[in-house]
Image: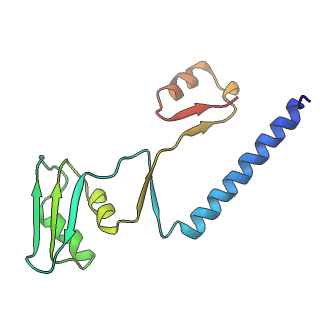
Amino acid sequence: MMRNPKSQANFDVFFLLLFSLIIIYFFYFFGFIFCFRLNKEPPNLTFRRKEKGGINFTSTATNTHLDLDTVKAICSEYRIHNADITLRYDATADDLIDVIEGSRVYTPCIYVVNKIDQITLEELEILDKLPHYCPVR
């Protein structure tokens, strides 16, 4: 039995609305617990608390964003006074905070662009340069 294209389109819209409501519900109740980082990799740095000895900050790459004073200031915000921190790349303060809190979720995503047939070719070329997108007609 063949489906009517109009009913299929209505079903698709209903499904997308239902899915978006589920996502909004999820972010409303669990968004304060987890923070999502879309299309990013987890930071390649090591953070380990210890009992005494202060903040030991070592790096195997050149740092342009973090120095010892910045790391100590961030750790003191979280009441951490003794820790070993090792950077393996040029990390930012946000990367260090993500590792300290430990509640970040790194997940891939696809950006869906709807009604792609209503835009011009120039706009489509601009969208074509974006990573992780999928046009839907």
In the rendered view of the protein, which quadrant contains the N terminus?
top right
Q: Quadrant of residue 28?
A: bottom right
| x 11%, y 49%: residue | 60
Quadrant placement of the C terminus: top right
From this viewpoint, which residue is outermost toward the top?
121
Decide which of 73, 47 is in the foreground and name it: 47
Rendered residue at 29%/67% (across/down): 100
Percent of width and height locating residue 46: 21, 59
- Name the residue at 54% across, 40% down: 110
Using residue 108 as the reference point, say whether residue 64 is left or right of it. left
Q: Report x, y in % for residue 64.
A: 16, 49
Q: Coloring scheme of the render? A: rainbow
Residue 95: x and y in percent read: 29, 57
**In percent of the image, x 17 and y 50: which residue is there?**
88
Q: Quadrant of residue 24?
A: bottom right
Which residue is nearer to you in this view: 101 or 116?
101
In the rendered view, does 127 fall on the left or right side of 43?
A: right
In the rendered image, residue 111, in percent from the top left (x then y), is placed at 56, 40
User: Residue at the left extreme?
Assistant: 53
Q: Quadrant of residue 104?
A: bottom left
For this orientation, the residue located farthest to the front is: 1
